[in-house]
Structures are given as structure tokens and as C-alpha cells.
Image: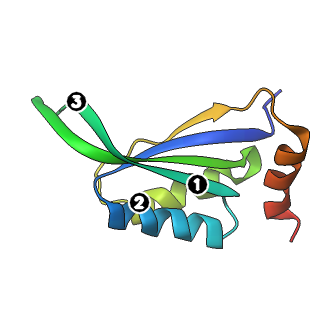
Amino acid sequence: MQNKYFIVLNTCPDSASAESIATTLVRNRLAACINIIPNIRSIYEWKGELNKGTEYLLIIKTLAECYKELEKTIQSLHPYELPEIIAVSIEAGLPDYLTWISEIRNE
């Protein structure tokens, strides 16, 4: 059975795109809360070339039922050709906090 709550990870190339995506997701009630962690170092291979750079990590708390729309929204706003969008199930958490996440669909 699919878990009800997700943490979704997404990296952005700069502060402006991170803020824009985070704001849109929260305003559209696709996420309860998003943390933006600046200045993470990323090393990856893309199209045969080794890349190193600084990115911003979004830690998105949401409901499983919001995931598909959240994914589409990130893809439509994201400057990367292939954005990182990885969902991880939340197995346990403070019950009141999880209830608060659920409220994005109740209001």
C-alpha cells in the first residue's frame, strides 16, 4: 500500500528558480512546506561530460495524492532539461505534523 506522505527532493541551479518553484507549489496547495538549502555541491555526468556546481536543494513535504500534479508543476517551471524529482515515503512522523501536511487538501 502506498504511503500517504512524501518528501520530494528537487535541485535547482539558483535561488530565483528555487524560490519560484517553492512558492508556486505552496500557493497551489501541492506542498505543505518546502525547505530551501543553498550552496550544496553537486557532481554528476550529463551528456558525457563531468559537471560540478553549486545548487539549491528543495525538501518538499506533501501528500502522495498530490505527487503527480506536483511533478508536472516542477517540470513546467524548472530550467533543467531533466530535473531531479525524487519522492521518498515518510514512514513515521509526529502525528500532529503529519495532520498539518494533510490540511493542504482540506482547505
For disc 3, the marked residue is 43
- Residue 70, how many percent across, how many down? 59, 56
Q: Is residue 84 above or below residue 101?
A: above
Q: In this view, does 11 lie above or below 79?
A: above
Alpha carbon of mark 1 to alpha carbon of mark 3: how far?
23 Å
**Left of 106 or right of it: where is 33?**
left
Tell me the kind of residue under disc 3: Ile
Alpha carbon of mark 3 to alpha carbon of mark 2: how far?
19 Å
Residue 18 tag number = 2
For disc 1, the marked residue is 34
Query: Which residue occupies the foreground of this view, 40 or 9?
Result: 40
**Left of 97 or right of it: where is 32?**
left
Considering only order in the chain, which callout, 3 or 1, is on the residue closer to the N terminus? 1
Who's the residue at 88% across and 49% down the image?
Answer: 99
Who's the residue at 27% across and 34% down the image?
Answer: 42
Query: Dots 3 and 2: beta carbons under 8 Å?
Result: no
Residue 99 tag number = none
